[in-house]
Amino acid sequence: MYKILLRQDLVPNVHLFKIEAPAVARKCQAGQFIVVRVDEEGERIPLTIADWDREEGSVTIVFMEVGATTRDLARLHEGDSVADFVGPLGLPTHVEDFGTVACVAGGVGVAVITRWRAP
């Protein structure tokens, strides 16, 4: 089980969860994702990693309620747990040093671009 350390409701149907997952946090890189399962009967869904803290052992996800599984996830609170939190998965984003750049995103994509750090 993976404990929810922090829950923030960004707007009525968009939520930020910080999840206790030290093994995942140790290996996270920008552009990767995790697969989460709310409970033993639930489906697995992929969510982009929005942030991580290797020292704290936490991974942050931001999601919008758009279906049954994300609605089930949104019903959880700080101190609750999810059954599975697998990752990091996917290839990390390749970032080169181009100097000053502007990143543009909309919706929940904004949460993800704020994580980028210079190599």
Image: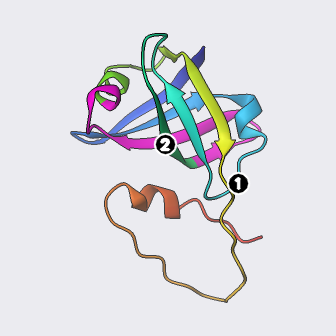
| Residue found 58% across the figure and 59% down from its top | 115
Of 5 and 23, which appears nearest the observer? 23
Q: Which residue carries the number 2 mark?
A: 47
Number of the label disc, if any, that sits on residue 37: none
Q: List x then y, in percent, for residue 10.
A: 31, 44
Q: List x then y, in percent, for residue 41.
A: 43, 11
Crowding at dot 1, Cα within 10 Å, few <14 / some 14-19 / many 20+, comes out as: many
Q: Earlier in the sequence, mark 1 or mark 2?
A: 1
| Residue found 49% across the figure and 42% down from its top | 47
Which span is picked out in magenta?
A: 51-70
Q: Which quarter shows the N terminus?
A: top right
- Mark 1: secondary structure: loop
CA distance for labels 1 and 2: 14 Å
* Residue 56 appears in view: no
- Left/right of residue 112 with respect to residue 69 in the rendered view: right
Of 65 and 15, which appears nearest the observer? 65
- Mark 2: secondary structure: strand
Which residue extends farthest left? 12
Amino acid, disc 1? Gln
Which residue extends farthest top? 40
Amino acid, disc 2? Leu
Q: Which residue carries the number 1 mark?
A: 29
Q: Where on the picture, by quarter, is residue 58?
A: top right
| Residue found 24% across the figure and 39% down from its top | 13
Q: Which quarter shows the C terminus?
A: bottom right
* Residue 93 appears in view: yes
- Name above or below for residue 79 compared with residue 112: above
